[in-house]
Amino acid sequence: MDNLQTYLYISAILFSLGLYGVITRRNGIAVLMGVELILNSANINFVAFARFGGMNFSGQVFALFVIIMAAAEAAVALAIIINVFNNLDTVNIDDARELKL
Amino acid sequence: MNNLLSISLFLPELVLTATIIIAIIVDIFSVSNRTSKVSNYVIIGLLATLAAVFLTNHSPTTLFMDSLAFDPFASFIKSVVLVATLLIIIFTRYSNEFKGYHTGEYYALLCIMVFGMFLMASAIDLITVYLSIEVVSLMSFILAGYLKNNPRSNEASLKYVIYGAFSSGIMLYGLSIIFGLTGTTKFFAIRDAITTLDSSSNLALTLSTVFVLAGFGYKISAVPFHFWTPDVYEGSPTPITAYLSVAPKAAGFALMIRFFNQVFVDGDSLSTLGWYADVSFAWPEILGVISVVTMTMGNLVAIQQNSVKRMLAYSSIAHAGYMLMAFPTISSEGVFAVMIYLVMYLFMNLGAFFVLIYVAQKQGGENFEHFSGLGWRMPIVGIVMTIFMFSLTGLPPTVGFIGKFYLFVAVINAGSAFYWIAFFGAINTVVSLYFYMRVVKTMYLDGNPSEEIIVPPLSVTLILLVLAVPSVFFGIYWTPILNWVNNSLLFFVQI
């Protein structure tokens, strides 16, 4: 348990789950949850590399910044989704199709 | 350079921060209907920032414990971004899309975005790379959806935020692998660490760089990370569309140039560039294919559009492809060509978008049919739009020709291995002639020429001239730009 590889496996699994969520889910909020999983898988990588690689603290610092950015991003994204819901009565990203692809 | 010493060279950013704070405070204390007041303060603040960019002279160095670079290249990109922002603020004041909206914080958000692009232009640390990209992205999500009651604007911001958050997440995962492989977040330390890696980590390195490329590609809207571009560009308020197609792209290219030139390239200075021999992956080929696919896709889809705004969105994808042509060569000549193109592109693209804003107000729409007969009814607008369309195609004697000329020269000079990129670039230029000339044809050959002639108000004529005169002037006499770019082609490099 206490080795780098375990953490890398966990983060890779988390990354894949996030990717799967973003690609398959059509609900805007579910897609955002997938993005959060991807961000956190990167965080696990950073902290694990910093802890086991015998490196300085930049990994932990990076992870802290990512947590802050993720919070800011979630706030903006949820505000946008609420606004879309007010106007279009849906949070499904496929229903927002006024602009043709 | 340590933190305390760095502050004196951080002057442009400090002035910009003061501008942001002043914009927010003025907005709070002003009567809600007179929000153009904020834009006056912001214009003064940005002009002061531009002055500060030119005044802070120092030999290339790093700021804040090696997290930002201070060099002429960064100052160049900062000036380009500032000029674009000033023009966009003037566009916004003129545009009627914001009627009924409180635009006070709009200008503050725009300034925060400029701050993010300043950091993008000078980032030499993975943490700064991620933070600056996110700052720019978050602000552009909000600005794209600024028209809260307009469903199209809502949809644009929704699509933007989903694609943006996703691709920055992918990029972050790539950055974490690079950090794991090299044990550092500084560009130069990464470069040194990569040389000591053995071949077993080639796969991880390649994969992580592809992930990072997803983040960069999304910022400059290169295929296959371009899906958000047409919808976001069509749905956003037109001034923001114009802004997104110029300024963040310039900053994104700056970041990409810095990343590839300083991490993957074996050189102490720009004069001796060349790809690392021990990075076995075919980077030049990959970037070349991305460039060719990007311009071909942009041009082929632009042909089918009925909306001029959407056509310009696809054309901006194609132009990103043209600029990417110079990347595989990784020569200082290629970087030089990209920098020239960024300046030229600023004038012609913002000009085309301003004509679009004006025509949409007068004719009530942004489709081709709204342009029919325009050349006879509004002679000045017609002539100016023709100049911009010629320029976007790359016909002499306009700036677009000079920009493309240097790009092609850089590709051809790089050797016969890159001829195919130039070949596709030339074909694409011919293809793009069709839809740019369609605008000119619609303006002059379609519709009924009426006797009535509309002369735009003086302010509009002035803005049009400010954009159209450089588009022709620098197409004939481009030495000033050449000198400026030549002096700016100096990176901070750590040996």
Image (cartoon, coloured by chain):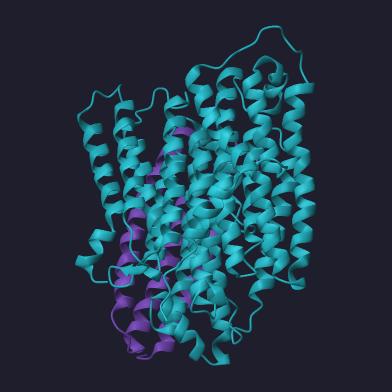
Chain colours: A purple, B cyan
Q: How many labels does the image show?
A: 0
Q: Residue at x 70, y 45 (%)?
A: B394
Where residue B31 appears, x then y in whole percent? 24, 23
Where residue A44 appears, x then y in whole percent? 38, 76
Q: Observer-nearest residue: B400 or B135?
A: B400
Question: For residue B45, which quarter of the picture?
Answer: top left
Q: Observer-nearest residue: B261 or B309?
A: B261
Image quadrant in which the N terminus of chain B is located: bottom left
Q: Which residue is drawn at 33% across and 69% down?
A: B62
- The answer to whether residue B285 is visible is yes
Above or below residue B94? Residue B486 is below
Question: For residue A50, which quarter of the picture?
Answer: bottom left
Image quadrant in which the C terminus of chain B is located: bottom left
Q: Residue at x 71, y 67 (%)?
A: B413
- The answer to whether residue A95 is visible is no
Above or below residue B124? Residue B108 is above
Where residue B97 appears, x then y in whole percent? 47, 26
User: Residue furthest toward the top?
Assistant: B451
Above or below residue B146? Residue B57 is below
Where residue B342 appears, x then y in whole percent? 55, 51
Q: Is residue B278 left or right of residue B4?
A: right
Above or below residue B435? Residue A57 is below
Q: Observer-nearest residue: B254 or B181?
A: B254
Q: Is residue A13 left or right of residue B353?
A: left
